[in-house]
Image (cartoon, grey):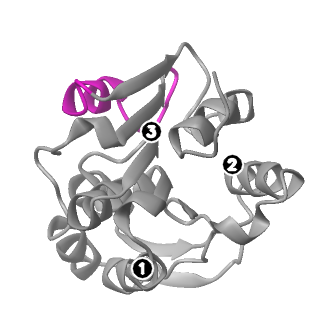
Amino acid sequence: MIIYIHGFNSSPASTKARQLGDRLQAMGLAAQYACPGLSHRPNAAIAQLEALIRPFPAGQVTLVGSSLGGYYATWLAEKYGCRAILVNPGINAHEGLRAYLGPQRNLYSGEPYELTEQHLEELRALFIAAPTRLERYYLMVTTGDEVIDYREAVAKFAGARQLVVQGSDHGFADFEEHLDSVLQFAGVGLTV
């Protein structure tokens, strides 16, 4: 099972989520893909994701987390022992999102909500200072990320498989070009 975890104010309609889902559908593997629309509340989002993960043995789940989704994926990989592909992941979301406190609107659904200190507290509880078993992580970052300093992710996940793409942006515009490596790491059987 591959579970795509979208980022802050994003949704299953995001470009990367659709690209991965479309590729798996074309391979006849649509039933092995999930991409839930997550609550803006971190605790609720984690509960949604745990409900998807629990039915499977750890070795049968790969999380693909983008931005805030990468922050969630790190915590879930540590708790459940599954593989995680982190795409321009949030490293310190409980600190980085402080700049966004106040009124928010989901970029895809238009749903309005207020980002509060409670959100940051819930995120702080999910912080992983030092990931373990680095072989279960695949870090994908872009040097042109305008939101998150890719060097923090490279340092935090030193020892994990890493792909550092020169240029690009936080949305990882080149993601589709690297889908084969994503599927190979997820155990779908492609070679890179």
For label 1, the residue is: 45
Instruction: Specify the quadrant of the image occupied by residue 116.
Output: bottom left
Q: Residue furthest right?
A: 26
Q: Are marks 3 and 1 in contact (CB under 8 Å)?
A: no
Relative horizontal placement of residue 61, taking residue 27 as reference (left or right): left
Coordinates of residue 173 in the picture (x, y in percent): 69, 33
Q: Residue furthest top?
A: 166
Frontmost residue, 17 versus 166: 17
Classify mark 2: helix, strand or loop. helix
The disc labelled 1 sits on which kind of residue?
Ala
Classify mark 3: helix, strand or loop. loop
Distance from label 2 to label 1 (Cα)?
Answer: 19 Å
Q: Are marks 2 and 3 in contact (CB under 8 Å)?
A: no
The disc labelled 3 sits on which kind of residue?
Val
Foreground tag (3 vs 1): 1
Q: Residues within 10 Å of mark 3 (few under 14, many from 20)?
A: few
Residue 147: mark: 3
The disc labelled 2 sits on which kind of residue?
Lys
Q: Residue furthest left?
A: 129
Residue appearing at x 27%, y 59% in the figure: 81
For label 2, the residue is: 16
Instruction: Specify the quadrant of the image occupied by residue 3.
Output: bottom right
Query: Which span is picked out in magenta?
Result: 143-159
Ranked by sequence position, the earlier of labels 2 and 1 is 2
